Amino acid sequence: MRDKKIVRIGGASGYWGESDMAVPQFLAAGGLDYIVFDYLAEITMSIMARARSADPEKGYALDFVSSVLKKNLTEIAAQNVKIISNAGGVNPEACARAIRHLIRDLGLDLRVAVVTGDDILDSFRDGAYGSIREMFSGETLPDVEKMMSANAYLGAFPIAAALDKGADIIVTGRCVDSAVTLGACIHEFGWTRDDIDKLSGGSLAGHVIECGPQATGGNFTDWREVADNIVDIGYPIAEIASDGSFICTKPQDTGGIVTVGTVSEQIVYEIGDPRAYILPDVVCDFSDVTVTQAGENSVMVSGATGCAAPDSYKATITYLDGFRGQMPLSFTGFEADEKIKVFTDAALSRARKKLVELAMPDYEEVSLEVLGTESQYGAMSKVSKGAREVVGKFSFKHVDKKAIVILFKEITGLALASPAGLSGLGGGRPKPSPVVRLFSCLIPKEDIAISVDVAGDMNSEAFTLETVGGTPVCQRSQNQPIMPPCDLADDRISVPLIKLAWGRSGDKGNKANIGIIAREAEYLPYIAMALTEQVVAARFDHFLEGSVERFLMPGFNAINYLLHDALGGGGIASLRNDPQGKCFAQILLDHPIPVPVELAERLV
């Protein structure tokens, strides 16, 4: 039986640029204790850093104040809903000042808190971490003059401290996405650092709602189930109990669906080893989590466990690494797929001649992905040559902006000499854009000074984290959970994976993950037998430069695949059409899986 006290938290935003429709939904439904917002990604931090350098009062999610709060703050106050957001970006103090100004204009009485300490760019520029190495590749620190942002991923306890001090609205800089939810749970339930299983459960609740409607039917494998009501899709609500279990639901009379499938897909989204999902406050183990349909648009999630938090924060640096150009092109007519290759090769050859004349180096990377020829499928493509209609994404990198301009000029200048059927050069010649790379590292927690400022009291005491004690960080078993046995005696027939499973994929830097969830427990052995690490590596060998790891999540019949060095650098550093691996699951879902004839007949 669940505890009587339930904390209801609505997830209103998954990125900067998200629709602002969630808050009116939540307020119309009523009954929420908190509304949380996640705005930040690595590239977002670099964009905000550039904005702050141009104007010291910018560098945060401006629309959080000007749109979300301005339209809804009076009703938020009337319903006594607390707001927690990392909208502060690289300038949380400025964000807090703007909110306090809005509160005065509206004649409200609300206390605003700001959590700072994540911004460590000055520490790097002062040489404090000159010998640090990239946590995955071992690369040395980039030139400090090229750094655009440097932030530690803070946790949830500073947020809880702000709530303890009476804050109504909390603004942070960079924190882990789930911390905005976990901080509310710590405050409401009085969890301590030793309540590791509860902290893991609260973190999982935050993970499920942090991407907004991705938990309520957005990006869902069975997209036709929500196609008729995606316009009014509902945003997720986590109803969290003191033991860390929770029910995921959504406001009544909204679109979308909340099912075992939608929630399970979000659980596997953008994770690595599910037994060691490392956060600042706890190392989570999601492998034995259970996901159960509790009612219409109501899913119960329980069983998260954890180990004590690590003694370091993950930190990310974004830095400038040259320039890129990108030109969309389309060809129509016979042999369109071959024509676009001839055209781009010719433009590149012309540009390279110019570089030689100017004694400039060659382009560091050139990419042409021809969409319409199943270029994303590699060797598994079923499209033969001779496509009559294609769109090409022609991209290139160079250390010098001038070289990008040269190739743009040669592309547009070649138009009249092109093979027949070219279009897509309208709208003017594009401009070079900076290549922003990511450098991830670990910073000892004792080096980060975190402050919690409530209601503009600049004398509020610094918030310092205690040294982690108790149970050490998870010592993971080297033995994987045993894959379920599979009966090999039956006659087999192959069916596409999508008949047996849901799938969701995403990115972490230059890594991609693909989470596969069996629709029924009996399907998992056949999926596990067919989709080995080697099979998945072969399926993505046109993208993959590293290895593939496979992790079983038996609690809800899932398998997570982690593809190392699979995204061409990842994020804005990548020239790929899909630099964040969002389509990888869709590519894998048509993979043939041998199953008994009897089972295949049931799937028809």
Image (spheres, rainbow, N blue to C red):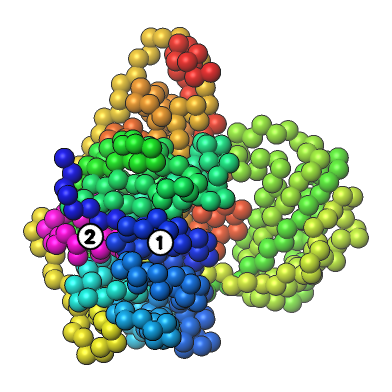
Residue appearing at x 73%, y 69% in the figure: 430
User: Mostly what secondary structure, the magenta segment?
Assistant: helix
Quadrant of the image occupied by residue 345: bottom right
Residue appearing at x 26%, y 60% in the figure: 182
Mark carried by residue 27: 1
- Tell me whether the residue at label 1 lies in contact with that at label 2, contact meaning CB atoms closer than 8 angstroms: no
Judge the density around disc 2: few (<14), some (14-19), many (≥20) Cα neighbours within 10 Å: many
Query: In the figure, is residue 342 to the left or right of 133?
Result: right
Judge the density around disc 1: few (<14), some (14-19), many (≥20) Cα neighbours within 10 Å: some
Say what secondary structure mark 1 lies in.
helix
**Residue 360 on the magenta span:** no
Residue appearing at x 76%, y 56% in the figure: 329
Q: Relative to 368, does residue 594 appear above or below in the rendering?
A: above
Q: Relative to 259, does residue 79 appear above or below in the rendering?
A: below
Nearest to N terminus: mark 1 or mark 2: 1
Label 1 to label 2, Cα distance in Å? 20 Å
Q: Nearer the viewer, residue 396 or 73?
A: 73
Q: Which amino acid type is shown beneath numbered disc 2?
A: Cys
From the top left corner, tell me how far across and down residue 555 is, in percent. Answer: 27, 35
Say what secondary structure mark 2 lies in.
helix
From the top left corner, tell me how far across and down residue 506 is, in percent. Answer: 46, 50
Mark carried by residue 185: 2
Q: Which amino acid type is shown beneath numbered disc 1?
A: Leu
From the top left corner, tell me how far across and down residue 301 is, in percent. Answer: 28, 42
**Residue 184 on the magenta span:** yes
Instruction: Work out which quarter of the rendered image holds the N terminus and state it.
Output: top left
Mark carried by residue 553: none
Q: Nearer the viewer, residue 55 or 493?
A: 55
Query: In the figure, is residue 419 to the left or right of 151?
Result: right
